[in-house]
Image (tube, rainbow, N blue to C red):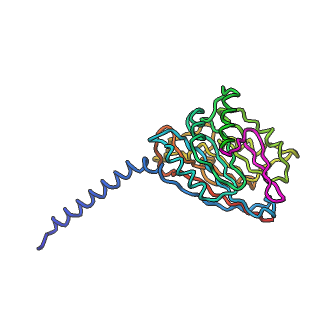
Amino acid sequence: MYRGRHARHSRWRSFGIKLAVFFLALLVLWPFAEPYTLEIDQSTIDSESLPSDIGQLRIVYASDFHLSGFPYLTQRRADTIISRINALNADLVLLGGDYADKPEETLTFFRSIGNIHASYGVYAVLGEHDRTLSDDAETLRSLRVTLRSKGITLLMNSVEPIRIGNSSIYLAGLDDLNSGWPDLKRVAASVNQEDYVIFLCHSPEIIPSAQIALDKNGRRNWFDLGLFGHTHGGQLAVFGGLLHLTDGIDSHYRSGWFVENRTPLLVSRGIGTSTVPMRWMRSPQIHLITVRSSR
């Protein structure tokens, strides 16, 4: 039966309306769904500083869990992410801070999660939500004890050597810039120029200062890989704007990989959310970094 031009136009108009409604619903709902996605960002770095007898290192880096309960990151979701981390069979697992939104909730986070597995250990720094300037010795002692019970070493203005075969690498971790007492000068001066050093700090705001800090030999460029979080990549990118603003941090350090002074630097978008349980074009991520010796 001939429908005529009007009937055909009505059919296409109806289809167009349904398509518009679908994309409008997607636009409204996706920011609430995106936090439940997870990207595994895989990167390979060739390094002349990594001892040749080590060959390569598989490093998993994860930051900014922000455990807070539904509709934010739940314990069940955290357990799923820990399982994903363990499935990557890392040599090292490094954690970048902001595990919850309050210090007491950070204790709950570490007490509740399952064990994290890595051949040469699990290490963590703290973010501004994990401690306060008024934390007393007992609060930090409880956190250290909890971390130790999970096989996690806390890096707080400290450098930890890791023996791998006949060689060593070094992990340098700084206290949080906003809620802690960072001592960059002491940390940088604890390593030698020939050491392979991975530097962790929650906030990338430290990067310009870290680049000019001096090692034990009085030289700059004291670390070989820098890992940071805090920014959430902006969390919500809407019409060029960002929800998760980070005062004092150059937009250049918002998220992703970049190289300065021949040093690879990573600012992770992290896992959880803050302020609102939404992300837009800033999906959660953890990182599998393979460092290969190029000696």
Q: Horizontal and vertical percent for residue 191?
A: 83, 46
Most distant residue in the right direction: 217
Q: Horizontal and vertical percent for residue 25?
A: 34, 51
Question: Which quarter of the figure has residue 127?
Answer: top right
Residue 153 lies in magenta, yes or no?
Answer: yes
Q: Along the line of sight, which residue is nearer the eye, 209 or 158?
A: 158
Q: Is residue 250 left or right of residue 168?
A: left
Q: Is residue 242 left or right of residue 10?
A: right
Residue 261 lies in magenta, yes or no?
Answer: no
Give the prevailing secondary structure in the magenta stretch. strand
**Residue at 72% of width from left, 38% of height from top?**
156
Q: How many numbered marks appear?
A: 0
Q: Horizontal and vertical percent for residue 22?
A: 32, 55
**Residue at 11% of width from left, 74% of height from top?**
1
Q: Horizontal and vertical percent for residue 23?
A: 35, 55
Position of residue 207 relative to residue 14, above or below, is: above
State which region is magenta: 150-173
- Name the quarter where the C terminus is drawn: bottom right
**Residue at 65% of width from left, 42% of height from top?**
202
Most distant residue in the left direction: 1
Q: Along the line of sight, which residue is nearer the eye, 257 or 274?
A: 274
Question: Which quarter of the figure has residue 10?
Answer: bottom left
